[in-house]
Image (spheres, coloured by chain):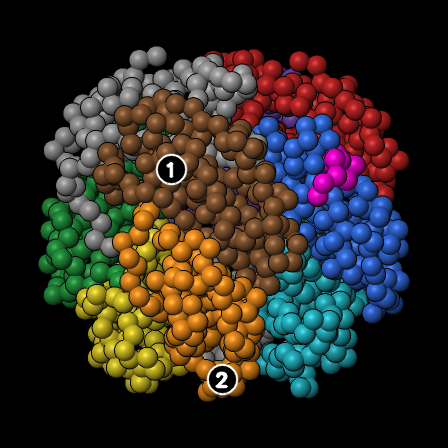
Chain colours: A blue, B cyan, D purple, E red, F orange, G yellow, H brown, I green
């Protein structure tokens, strides 16, 4: 499923967009068992923003794919960066418990320009 | 609805005002369906402060407007900045879940002057 | 009600005192309706500390006063600074919901000296 | 009750130890009424670590002592610093509500050396 | 039990892996009583990543070992660093309450290189 | 908007369906101000079940209607009972805070037959 | 302040109305100190319902009254019963902590008729 | 996938078994979109108990099936009852939010015999 | 310390009073170590109510007493019943964790007369 | 390890004792992997009460035992009933997540006599 984008409506401002995807599932390539995660995508948009429905369908494309935690997190980041050229982007995946352990993978792209409005507190 | 303001009662001090609006609704321009959000407005006032009742009425003005998440967040920021010339302002909108995804947009204006009283901890 | 103070028992150390007042009420000067807030006072003491019972009585003095959120927060800060000359002080007021909006005002005084024991984490 | 210590098993590493004491009680010197607190002790150990059982007994020694919030926090810090010469230490006491106000006192000693492993978060 | 590793699938990117182990138990060397902890392992991978199942089995190896809080935290860190040469690693152990006190030990290795994607907020 | 229904797929079993609507808004007939609520609909289906999408659209039909809390709760109940003839139904509306007060209205229809599977605990 | 009522819009149905008042304050007749409470009023309406704004103003009438916890709870119940003749009513007051103790008083009037729609679970 | 069972190790006692399945996904037959749920299965075992691993695999069998909320809940109940003949069983499915609405379906089988150990409180 | 009482201001009504004491400490008769608990006292008053300040002082009387969990709970109940002759009373003590176990003891006196206002839900 | 008991200090009263054991571990007989649970024991004591330290040691006796969830819950109940002849007893075990499923087993003994002090609410 191709990721669709739309023009950033406020391209001159340095602001952040944060999408939390509650329903993500892929397959463990080692055991063939399904994995479940919550995916958080945060970015400072460049020229274009990610369209939400195509993002949902793109992530559904992993439903039957065998792929490891570390890999899928980086693949999603790479695909999103390629699609919308953000100024900064971070993808975080929180996986449900396996064998008494739960894991969180966080990968990022770019370095935020001096932001226009850091918090004063 | 015009935003009303009143003179900052302590214009010499660098302090922050934070309004959390629990009840915001607008319309998705693509589907015509209502969207719901919580809007948080934080600012360091300049010469004038935003009057709370007019803020409520101003935000109710979006009830029937078709407008995207990213756009409405930046529009609110622009209107508030124009109305009260804050030293710093940030608008954050948290949207309810759509298709298993919820989104948060954060836009800011200005850069806090060296604040008079940062937290020591 | 006058604010009472006592000598800082450890004047050579840079440390913080934090009082959270759960029960504060004043009156809205516009509508005549009562307002309710939680007030948080944090400071690095100088030569003197604020006595807790007199603080309680001082804050009860606002029970019948008509005063706006922004103003009362700064007035409390000014009075406390005058009473105990802290190295740093911050007053934060969190107000209960009015018209679907709740507000938080944060004002500070001074700048923390290079603190003796910042957190390493 | 004397505080006991044991040799730091990893003296070359810069790491933190954090003890949260849920059950602390002393007496208000003004009213004679019991006070209750939660005490948090965090430190980067130097040559020696605090032995946990002697810490418990040391803190029980305040059960019948009349002492103010600010004072007891600094006294505990001083005693612990004298006992184990930490690279950095912080003592935080959170007191239960009195007259609708609860208080938190935080005192520290030393300045963390450039830590070996700050969080990249 | 030997720790197994696998090649970092994205060795060029600076990203973090975070494993939270809910079920850890060892034995107090002083009392012979079992201790229980939650162990959190966060790292920026270098050439290799820790394999999750071998991590589980490695940690189960402490089930009958008599070892102190401070020691076990540093031993786990040392073993993991030796196994996978991370760019940065932190091990945090949170122990269940003993005598009204619970403890948290945090040890780290390395210093994060200038990370590729710090958070803008 | 008409409520649509579909045949109960398991008409012989006594079971419950529970829909929680997070996004409901209507208008106060007295002040003209928008009201916001969370609506919970629980029922034991009879011959037919309520179709979820038509339920959403039906409830959106109150967006511009001036109607009191007590009334709208009973009207929704009446309309749903007329549409699907449940064995038992309960409608609960939780309204957001107005003047420091929030309200909950609960109305029901019918009496549950001796249910086939009450909880044993 | 007189309590106002309006005709029950659905007098034939047995349903419940629940008002939670977050902001209540009165005065302790013994110490002269202000008391704070959260008041919950639940009832099955008879011929008339309590009007919300007059309820708010009625409760504000206790702001300067010296009255004990047990008494004020029963007085509110008596006044509300006299005003609207409910089929059943319960008033619960939760008071903020005094001397390490917080109190809850619950008083009721009437006995619910066999309700039309008890919960099946 | 067939459900496997094992003999109830304590067939003479009336006791309950409660399995909470955090990771369930099926497909909406109308939209083709994936649905996600948490499934709770509680039962008083008869002659046999459900084997946990086969339960997991059985529920994974719905991953690609198009089936409505109400139907899948009853189908799971029917299959489990057929497999292990419980004295009482209840299946509850909590579905993630769709269009601002989340749903819970609860179906049961049998009636608990007079249980041997009801709670006294 | 003697328990004081005052006349029930509404002796004809069947209502409940609930006091939650956050700060209770006694001594373990076996180990000599302090124990900490939260005590909850609920009752339907008869002719007299327990005065709050004398209740606080009465409970402080256990500060240096060696007494077991089960015993102190019943002793408090007996003393309170003797002092105020309630129609019904329940005392619940929740003790802080010892050896990984925390305990709750609940003892009661009397049987509530047919209460005047049971909850309809 | 034998369970020790002591004489019920208030044998004439019908009251409940509730022990929550946060730290329980046994071994899965099928996989050899450790299992972890929280065990809750509630009972109305008869002639004797369970001594807390011996309870802790008794439960530690399962640390290396291979035993299923359902079995261990009933075995603990049987052993405790044999040791102290309670009027009523319930044992509940909550197991940590395995394969995305967590389980709770609840077994009871006896039937509470008409309790002396049921809750009126």
A65 within the magenta span = yes
Q: Nearer the viewer, residue E49 or I30?
A: E49
Q: State the residue position of label 2.
A: F66
* Image position of B76 (left or right of F24): right
Q: Which mark is residue G9?
A: none
Q: State the residue position of label 1.
A: H43
Q: Position of residue B22 (x, y in %)?
A: 57, 68
Q: Position of residue E48 (x, y in %)?
A: 81, 26
Q: Position of residue I45 (x, y in %)?
A: 16, 56
Q: What residue appears at the point 68 percent right and 20 percent down from the top-left corner?
A: E54
Q: What residue appears at the point 35 percent right and 78 percent down from the top-left corner?
A: G55
Q: Residues within 10 Å of mark 1 (few under 14, many from 20)?
A: many
Q: Residues within 10 Å of mark 2 (few under 14, many from 20)?
A: some
What is the distance, in whole Å, between disc 1 and disc 2 at their CAs?
47 Å
Chain ID at mark 1: H
Q: What residue appears at the point 74 percent right and 53 percent down from the top-left corner?
A: A57
Q: Which residues are magenta?
A: A63-72
Element on which disc 2 rests? loop
């Amino acid at each position: 499923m191709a990721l669709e984008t739309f023009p950033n409506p406020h391209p001159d401002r340095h602001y952040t967009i944060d999408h939390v995807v509650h329903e993500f599932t892929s397959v463990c390539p080692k055991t063939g068992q399904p994995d479940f995660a919550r995916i958080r995508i945060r970015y400072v948009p460049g020229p274009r923003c990610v369209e939400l429905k195509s993002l949902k369908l793109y992530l559904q494309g992993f439903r039957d794919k065998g792929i490891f935690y570390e890999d899928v997190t980086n693949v999603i980041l790479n695909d999103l960066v390629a699609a919308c050229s953000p100024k900064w982007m971070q993808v975080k995946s929180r996986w449900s418990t396996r064998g008494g352990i739960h894991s969180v993978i966080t990968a990022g792209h770019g370095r935020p320009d001096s932001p226009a409005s850091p918090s004063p507190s």
